[in-house]
Amino acid sequence: MKNKPNLQNAYNLKSPDDNIKLYSAWAETYDNSFIINMQYKLHFAVAEEFILNGGSGLILDVGAGTGALAEALLQKVKFNIEATDISKEMLKVADSKKIYKRCFVSDLTKRIPVGDSFYDGVVSSGTFTHGHVGPSSMDELVRITKAGG
Ligand SMILES: C[S@@+](CC[C@H](N)C(=O)[O-])C[C@H]1O[C@@H](n2cnc3c(N)ncnc32)[C@H](O)[C@@H]1O
C-alpha cells in the first residue's frame, strides 16, 4: 500500500501532495514507529552541529515534523524555535509538545510566508532527502535568513 507509513514508502514519494498524504497518515504514530523503533538519530547530530557552529537567536525548523530536532536542540540550549512543515497533522503533534514558539504550514518548494532576513538561523533534519525536498528550496531558505545566519 503506497500510503502505508514507513521509511521505504517515504523515500519513494514523488510530490508535495504525496508527502501531505503519507505524513497525515503517519503523524500520530511517527514518534513510536519511526523515531523509537528505528532508532532514528539524525536530529541529535544536526543539533550538535548547529550548536558547534554557534547557532543562536530566532530559529526556524523546516520540515519540523513532530518536533524531534527541537527536542534535541532544547536538551542542550534554550533556543527560540519556530516550526514549519507541509503536514498540518505532523505540526499538530509538534505543537502539542509546547516546544515551538509558533508552528505554521508551508511548502518548502514554494514561497515560505515570512519576510526577508526574518530568522537568525534555519535547521532541518530528515527533510532534504529522497522523495521529500531537494535543493530548489535553498534560495528561499537563504532569503528568510539573516546574513551570516
Ligand atoms: C522524515 S520527516 C522529518 C521530520 C523531523 N524533522 C524529524 O527529524 O523527525 C520529513 C518531514 O518533511 C516534511 N515535508 C516533506 N515535504 C515537504 C515540503 N515540500 N515542505 C515542507 N515540509 C515537507 C514532511 O511533512 C515530514 O514532516
Image (cartoon, grey):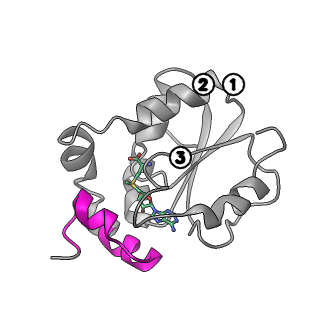
Could you tell me how far apart the alpha carbons at marks 1 and 3 are, in whole angstroms?
16 Å
Mark 2: C-beta under 8 Å from nearest atom of ligand 1: no
Image quarter (top left, top right, bottom left or bottom right) of the N terminus: bottom left
Cβ atoms under marks 1 and 2 closer than 8 Å: yes
Pointer 3 residue: 124
Could you tell me how far apart the alpha carbons at marks 2 and 3 are, in whole angstroms?
13 Å
Could you tell me how far apart the alpha carbons at marks 1 and 2 are, in whole angstroms?
5 Å
Relative to residue 115, is residue 42 depicted above or below? above
* Rendered-image quarter of ligand 1: bottom left
Is-magenta flag for residue 16?
Answer: yes
Relative to residue 98, is residue 103 depicted above or below? below
Mark 3, Cα crowd under 10 Å, few <14 / some 14-19 / many 20+, is many
What residue is shown at x 36% (from left), y 52% (from top)? 93
The magenta span reads 3-22
Q: Compare marks 1 and 3 and give the one earlier in the sequence.
A: 1
Q: Compare marks 2 and 3 and give the one earlier in the sequence.
A: 2
Pointer 1 residue: 54
Amino acid type at mark 1: Gly
Amino acid type at mark 2: Ile
Is-magenta flag for residue 108?
Answer: no
Pointer 2 residue: 51
What residue is shown at x 74% (from left), y 46% (from top)? 119
